[in-house]
Each structure stands twice: as C-alpha cells, then as structure tokens.
Amino acid sequence: MLEWGRRYLMVEPNHFRVDYAINPYMDLHDQPDHVHAREQWLDLVEVIRAAGAGVEVLEQRPDAPDMVYAMNLGLVVNPLASSGRGEHVVLSHMRYAERRVETPTAASWFSDAGFSRSWVGRDGVGAHFEAGDAFAFRDALVVGYGPRTEELGLKHLAVELDVRVRGLRITHPGMYHLDLAFCPLDETRAMLCPAAFDAASASAALAMVPDPLLLTEEEALTFCANSVVIGQQIIMPACPDRVRAQLEEWGFQIVLVDVSEFHKGGGSIRCMTNPLDVLVGRDLPEVLGGQVVIA
C-alpha cells in the first residue's frame, strides 16, 4: 500500500477553458462546459475526501486556464519530521510560456502554507521541469523527460532533493507527461504503458516494476493511468475491462469519476491532484548529493 497520497492540492476551475493548443487533446473549437466541469470537479473532491484523503484548494488565476491541472505546479518532496526541516516544494518551470504565469501564484500559496521553496534551474530560468513527470516509486524519483521536462532537469532534482532520479525518455505525443503512462499502485505494482517511451526507457521501466500491469497504447489513451491511489481505492476516469479485472484480482477497489470535460485540456484525475505528503526517508531513500540514472 502506498504511504503517500493522503493529502492533495487542487485548483478550483473557475476559469478553465481552452485558449491555446499545447497538446494533442486541445481544440479551440471544443470548449469545456463551465457548469459541467465545475460539477465534475466537485464530484472528484467529494470522492477523494470520502476515500480518506484531505484536499486543499487554491483559487485559479483568471489568466491561467490550465491551472486546474494542479499536479504540474510543483513537486512536493518533504524531509522526515525528525530532520527538523519543514515541508518543501520544487516549483515547476513550464516548457510553454502560456503556463508559466501559474508558478508565482503557486509559490505564494506554498509559502503561506509554510513550505520552503526551490526551482529547477536558477530562479526558474534553467531547465524545464513539470511536476506531472515525477513520481516516488521504490528506490527512486521516477521522472519522465522529453516533451515537457528536459533531461538537464533530472540532475537539478537529484541534487536539490538528495534522492536518486531515474529518467525515462517519453516519445509518445499523447502521453507527454509521465502521469499519463505510469501510475504507482503500491510498493511493487504499477500501471505502465511501454508505448509511451523509447525502447531503452521502456525496458528500464519494465525492469524497475516487479509486478507491472502493462497497458496497451489504446488503454492508456483512455487516461486510465492518470488516476489517484488512496489505500486500496483507485479513483479513475476510465477503466478498461482487462485493466479492471487485474486490479480487482489484486484487491483494489475501482471508483470511477467522470472528468471528461477536463480531458478537453489534455488532463485527467492525477493531473488535477497534487500530492503534498511524499517523504524522503519513507517513500524515497535519501541519497546524499543525489544520483541520476538515465535509461
């Protein structure tokens, strides 16, 4: 069972719309329905809280329509309380300028909430990094790079956080963030779509997951990997029959939540939820000075 994933930051979708196209799902002629989107967001919040997790809410900037995808605001990796250091966030430096206005607002929220802050690259100007590309799993912070996060960003993360970083090169345009192709389930299991990566990274991904649930490209493009795991519950936007059968055989309970309006912007449940409770020393081993392993 995953220890993290019991506390989330989400952004209320008061200004969600499609103003530009920076991924294959965005179409300026297919706008989300504001009322329906808000209902779906509220349903998701209710389901997450009913599963036993906390949700903290950040107000959306009017000029930041993609800010609802809170996963990408920053990567929270906290030291253990025994270290005497407080909670910490590495703020994202978005690849696309359209999304960079989100970071100052996120930085203010994290500061007000008592988090120390840092950026990938000096003052957020160096290598691009988007937190939707990073997950704690087993002995490393697994980070996808290519479409959004740059390879140079992996070194910054390793050194900044004193952790091991395993880099996987993403090549599929429809799975441009790691959270569209990879979903940790517990200490040994994860949903994984090899088609998201180049050959070397697909092999490396398979090697790092002892018990993978391999997703076909068709299955992954339903956004099923873009899910939230809270204990034995998996909150999913979709669950193909074969995937459901394996998850239920493993003892997981599937909770489906319709967030189809948010798929119009290229994100789903995981994209909308940023976990605030990953700990170095519990969910990630400490590696002083950091280490980067590139497939």
Image: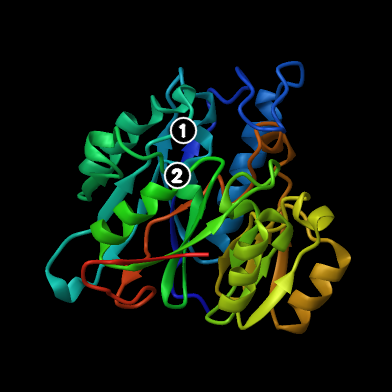
1 or 2: mark nearer the eye: 2
Q: Residue furthest right?
A: 241
Q: Position of residue 52 (x, y in %)?
A: 51, 66
Q: Pointer 1: residues within 10 angstroms few (<14), some, or many (20+)? A: some
Under mark 2, the amino acid is Glu
Using the rendered view, name the quadrant where residue 194 is placed.
bottom right
Using residue 118 as the reference point, say whether residue 103 is left or right of it.
right
Image height of 188 relative to 159, above or below: below
Judging from the image, what secondary structure is the residue with disc 2 in? loop
Image height of 13 relative to 228, above or below: above
Identify the residue at horizontal 71%, vertical 52% (top origin).
Answer: 257
Q: Which residue is mark 1?
A: 95
Identify the residue at horizontal 18%, vertical 60% (top origin).
Answer: 86
Give the Cα separation between the discs numbered 1 and 2: 9 Å
Using the rendered view, name the quadrant where residue 129 is placed.
top left
The numbered dot on residue 185 is: none
Q: Position of residue 144 (x, y in %)?
A: 52, 54
Identify the residue at horizontal 62%, vertical 64% (top origin).
Answer: 200
- 21, 222: nearer the viewer: 21
Under mark 1, the amino acid is Arg
Q: Are marks 1 and 2 in contact (CB under 8 Å)?
A: yes
- 123, 236: nearer the viewer: 123
Q: Position of residue 139 (x, y in %)?
A: 42, 77
Image height of 151 relative to 202, above or below: above
Q: Which residue is mark 2?
A: 150
Q: If you read the primary sequence from the N terminus, does the residue marked by circle 1 or circle 2 appear first?
A: 1
Identify the residue at horizontal 16%, vertical 76% (top origin).
Answer: 82
Image height of 213 relative to 198, above or below: below
Using residue 67 as the reference point, say whether residue 74 is left or right of it.
left
Judging from the image, what secondary structure is the residue with disc 1 in? loop
